[in-house]
Image: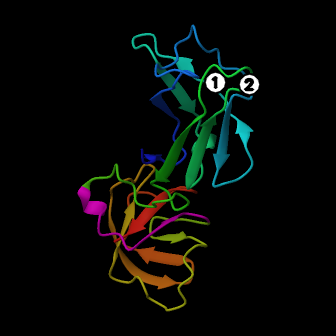
Amino acid sequence: MGPDLTKYGVARDFYIPIPKQGSTDFASTADWTPAAGDVKVSKDGGADANIATLPSAVASTAGLWKVSLSNTELTAKAVSVRIMDAATKAVMDDALRILTFGDPNAQYPYDFSLPNYALAAITYGSVTGTATTTTLQDSSLTVADVDFYKGRILLPLTGALRGLGSKINGYTTGVLTFDAMTRAMAASDKYAIC
């Protein structure tokens, strides 16, 4: 089975069946009580950490378990959740693979939950410095050509201005100038240039 796709940095529940050790059946609460160390999370291949919230059985369906991941646990391009019962094995080793979207730091920067008008984006970024109603600073904008983005549309993806487009009138490294918006974007607000 391929990886799950989820929004970067947004807590989410995943529902998976977990096979019982030495059986063709799925495990229920009578078979397994998750304990600290049984479920580990790795972000972008980094060091394993105990999951913040241990899995719990879904009462309405035998053999289905809820694995809850926090905002912090989902701040990576690729997240691996490994189930490895540490005691006398009650369940088989299993894994949940997750890829993220919707953030410049995600595996897929594009936010698939946005409407179709954002599909034409050529780059994504976030406000890293001062912003006004007509300018923003983003240290990830490193193109050296003056006015490189001029004539494009700035499209806020998060915050109070989400979805409000503005024409870009000028660009110097790290700074966009655009038609006035109703307010300034906030620090860390995400945007697309279309």
Q: In this rendering, is residue 31 above or below 158?
A: above
Residue range in magenta is 116-128
| View extreme (top): residue | 30
> Judging from the image, what secondary structure is the residue with disc 2 in?
loop
Q: In this rendering, is residue 2 above or below 121?
A: above
Q: Is residue 170 visible?
A: yes
| View extreme (left): residue | 116
Q: Are marks 2 and 1 in contact (CB under 8 Å)?
A: yes
* Residue 119 within the segment the image draws in magenta: yes
What residue would you read off at disc 1?
A: 54
**Which quarter of the figure is the C terminus placed in?**
bottom left
Q: Which kind of residue does numbered mark 2 sit on? A: Ala
| Residue at 48% across, 58% down | 190
What residue would you read off at disc 2?
A: 36
Q: Give the side of residue 186 with respect to residue 44, left or right.
A: left
Residue 61 image-quadrant placement = top left
Which mark is first along the chain, 1 or 2? 2
Residue 46 in the image: state x and y as whole percent.
Answer: 71, 53
Residue 64 in the image: state x and y as whole percent.
Answer: 45, 21
Q: Which kind of residue does numbered mark 1 sit on? A: Leu
| Residue at 24% across, 58% down | 116
| Residue at 34% across, 68% down | 166
